[in-house]
Image (cartoon, rainbow, N blue to C red):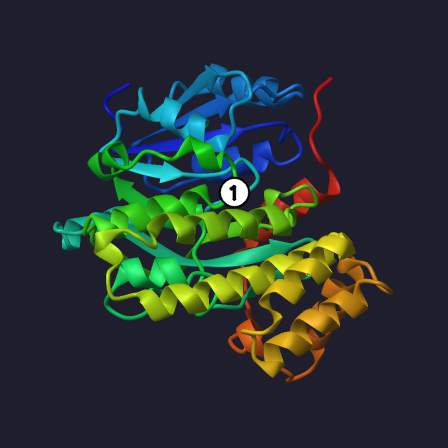
Amino acid sequence: MNSPVISVIMPCFNRERYLEAALQSVLWQTFTEWECILVDDGSTDCSAAIFHQHADRDDRFRYLHEENQGPSAARNLAMGIARGEFVQFLDSDDIIPPGRFRRCVDQFRQQPDTDVVYTNYVGYRRREGFVRSLPARIPGNDPLKAFLFEQNETFATVIHSFLFKRPVVVAHPFDTSFRNLAEDIECWIRMAADGVRFSYVDEVLAVYRYSEDSLAVEESALYAMRIQVLERYQGDPRCAGFASEFAAGSRRMHQRLAVGYFMERSFGHGWKEMKNVWRESTWGERIKMSLWGTLMTVFSRDQIFAARAWVLAHTFLRWGGWVNYATWDAPPEVRQLLSACDSAPRVLR
């Protein structure tokens, strides 16, 4: 095959239930000059067999295997053979709508000085459908400040909402010490600190799936890593002048860590973390932490999430990060693809 314009890099560990949909979302792109590199991160299920079915029919699909090292190492490994002018990361349980590649490449052609094009996205849960909460656009004029202190506070991005010029990714490999939590945010912070230029497309061109076994369920581990990220950059000269932001950001992350422990019903750790951050917290923040600790003694996290989803869907009540909550009218092909995956997961034995 000729050199592709886009290299899609897809780490995969035991995702046989979702992998077919992710691959199909690459295959249906209207822009066809791509390669898709799947890095099998030591899967023990049928993920490799599913991928090889595509590779046998289409030489744009390429396969790598490594012993389980986590998605950061898998992405770095694939970059060693990626040939595209641009790089698209796509986790094996997420999907991208058919027009994504063409629209993002067009944006690069229109703005040749841009290093990274990123787009709006929606989340998808089987029982809730397609929803948006926080805006996806990086706020203000300082991406470094935004990624350090405002990610998941005033805006939110997901890894497959970005399309990168390959040299940008080569110069900023993923830090494998983070393995599979907060590794993307840490990477974007390094890019922003080095002056990488971002350009936004206000179209939903990425769908983030909240799968039942998603890494996103590891709330306490995620926020522990977020705290490590802040600590790493607190002494960086490029972050000089952010002293008050670091203090406020650290407080929020420790509050989130307490809530994360409560979500996992690790109450001893949760109350201890809440006690440590109590004095510097506002009364509103104290009430929020205490409420989570109390609710989780009675209800499961899934029950609380389901109740929240019902309130958002059936009332006008909005609060916190849900002020901008909205549903998304997904194209029929996107809806059908995810519905088929939910109702008849593909397993080859």
Q: Outermost residue, bottom direction? A: 316
Q: Which residue is tagged 1?
A: 181
Q: Residue 328 versus residue 37: which sits nearer the camera? A: 37
* Residue 160 at least partly seen: no
Q: Is residue 189 left or right of residue 62?
A: left
Q: Residue at x 37, y 27 (%)?
A: 76
- Which residue appears at 30% of the width and 25% of the height? 82
In the rendered image, the vertical position of residue 319 relative to residue 76, given as above or below: below
**Mark 1 burial class by Cα count in 10 Å: few <14, some 14-19, many 20+:** many
Image location (x, y in percent) of residue 334: 54, 50
Residue 41 coordinates in the image, percent (x, y): 53, 22
Q: Which residue is located at x 76 percent, y 55 percent?
A: 268
Tell me the quadrant of the picture where the C terminus can be found. top right
Camera sees residue 235: yes
Q: Where is 264 relative to 39, above or below?
A: below
Q: Is residue 41 above or below residue 93?
A: above
